[in-house]
Image (cartoon, coloured by chain):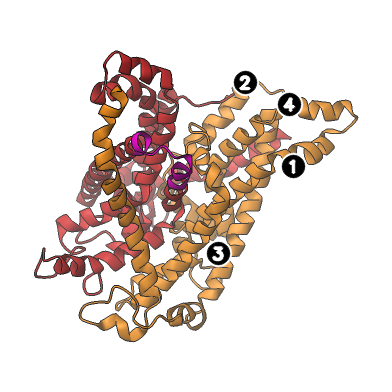
Amino acid sequence: MLLPVLGTVFVVVTYPLLLAVGQSLRATRGGSFVGLRNYASALEDPLLYDALGATGVYAGIVLPAEILAGLGLALLVHRTVRSARVRLAVYILATLPIVIPPVAVGVIARLIYAPGYGVLNHLLRLAGLVQAEIPWLSRRDTAMLAVSSVDVWQWTPFVYLVFFAGLQTVPPESIDAAQVDGASGWTLFSRIELPYLRPLLLMVLFFRIADVLRVFDHIFILTGGGPGSTTQLLSIYLYRVAFKFFDTGEAAALAVMVMLAMSLLYAAVTRLLPLERD
Amino acid sequence: MPRRRSGRLWRVVGPPVLGAVGLAYAFPLYWLLVTALKGEGELYQATPSLYPLQPTLAAFSSVLVTRGFLGLLRNSIVVCGATVLLVLAIGFAVTYPITRLKVSRRLRVGVLNWALSLRFLPPVAVVVPYFAIVRGLGLYDRRLALVLIYTVLNLPFSIWMLKGFLAEIPLEIEEAAFVDGASRWVAFRRVLLPLAAPGILASGVIIFAFAWSEFLFALILTASPRAQTFPVGVQGLVTQFEIIWNDMAAAGAIALAVPLGLMVVARRYVLAGLTFGVIRGQ
């Protein structure tokens, strides 16, 4: 029973990957074999480096922000909230943003940042902080901040949940013993709690790096990659090469390179993560 | 008491920070709802009102009826429902043997590693081959294409989730049924399935929620209301030249309400599913 099912699933999942390799070696028009020419033209396109840069900036903003905020909030709730009922309520609330469709989050962000109706400018003016309207989505610096803020809004709760669950696994006896020895504050955290959180930190990092390459929906809704190519992350760029420039060969070459990069990440994951396979 | 001394700073900082975080999550959702409940006249005030002056459901009826999003809603429900059934069936066919039968450790680890590796494959990397395959099969602009692709996308973490749930049910319970003369199929249906039911339900809900959210493939592989899903419709309202704010907000609110409602059922398991079992549910 296992082998036929597994075999079929394996073929269904793997065939598209092989097809991508095949497409990457053929000309978009005509389909003749062109060797690595698609790879060369993909690597020659300056827009690729813009996309890589934008992806790096995006990751450089959202990963530290989510990890620090998630960790800080986990410690905060762990230290100050004792009531089991409140903890459960926070747990339930924190699971909610994870399942909100990114398209809907994009809509919400639009209602906040857009010129005209966007509420952020009105709130800032109400507070007397700005006089003129700030065009959040059409300035290069603020556009990147706006799309990053959406990611942070949606994914910090996930990071929080992971770290909060990790803090529950720290044995209270270790904490008590350390406190008797006079440890407190930073020492307590870095010496006793952090070792328990380290594998989770790695997991969050790996999963979130993989996710940065998946980011598509909310940027597509919010800025469409603009202004210019400021927020055109790798996924948006690949989509444009395939479905706006209709260059299937080059898009497939990009896809294969992304797959290779991700298999390196995956190799690190299997080596460093405490996954239960038994 | 050292514990009290070290906790004082946290206790001072705690409430205001938690309050601010709560506001940062509540206000955007509030603003979505408020906008969805506004009438057309309120959209073009110089300073938009922070609450609806005359709350109305006009935007919802405009989206669902006038714009015909009811059809997209039906597409979404059909696609997601079919995906859930297919993923659970295949997921069981894969996880039952590796948790219940005597298979080699290498096969089991191999299957689980392979499922995990797919988590690191960005969907956009397979967009080009999937598009070619779907065209080749004549499934372009058909809901079936989305069902098949969503099944592939959701299978990896479903395998890990189902494996987690099945592994928690002791083998002895089934063995007792075998001793009483039950066949493997009967033991599966009468003993294992009822015990695994809460986990299966949770997996189903989460698969539904993820399939419901999917946008990239739905955007690329559909072209008309006969197969377009709800998120594609929402996107259509956003990128128009002139955005009708209340309609867009109403559509966004519907897109958001469905998975939020479902999460009430599955909340205990969502974290275990998302982290491939590294974190257990509460």
* Horizontal and vertical percent position of residue A138: 18, 64
- Look at the numbered disc 4 and give the secondary structure of its residue: helix
CA distance for labels 1 and 2 = 27 Å
Foreground disc of the pair 2, 4: 4
Q: Note whether residue B265 is visible.
A: yes
- Residue B275 vs residue A171, the one in the foreground: A171
Q: Are marks 3 and 4 on the same chain?
A: yes
- Look at the numbered disc 1 and give the secondary structure of its residue: helix
- Residue type, label 1: Pro
CA distance for labels 3 and 4 = 38 Å
Query: In this rendering, is residue B31 above or below B14?
Result: below
Q: Earlier in the sequence, mark 4 or mark 1?
A: 4
Chain painted red: A
CA distance for labels 4 and 1 = 14 Å
Query: In this rendering, is residue B128 above or below A71?
Result: below
Q: Earlier in the sequence, mark 1 or mark 3?
A: 3
Q: Determine the residue positioned at 44% across, 30% down.
A: A168
Q: Which residues are magenta?
A: A77-90
Q: Earlier in the sequence, mark 2 or mark 4?
A: 2
**Badge 3: few (under 14), some or many (20 or more) residues near its Cα, within 10 Å?**
many
- Toward the top, the furthest residue is A181
Chain painted orange: B
Count every numbered label the image shows and give the total.
4
Q: Which residue is mark 4?
A: B171
- Look at the numbered disc 2 and give the secondary structure of its residue: helix
**Chain of the residue where label 2 is placed in the rendered structure:** B
Query: In this rendering, is residue A16 above or below A224?
Result: above
- Residue type, label 2: Arg
Q: Quadrant of the N terminus of chain A?
A: top right
Q: Note whether residue A247 is visible.
A: no
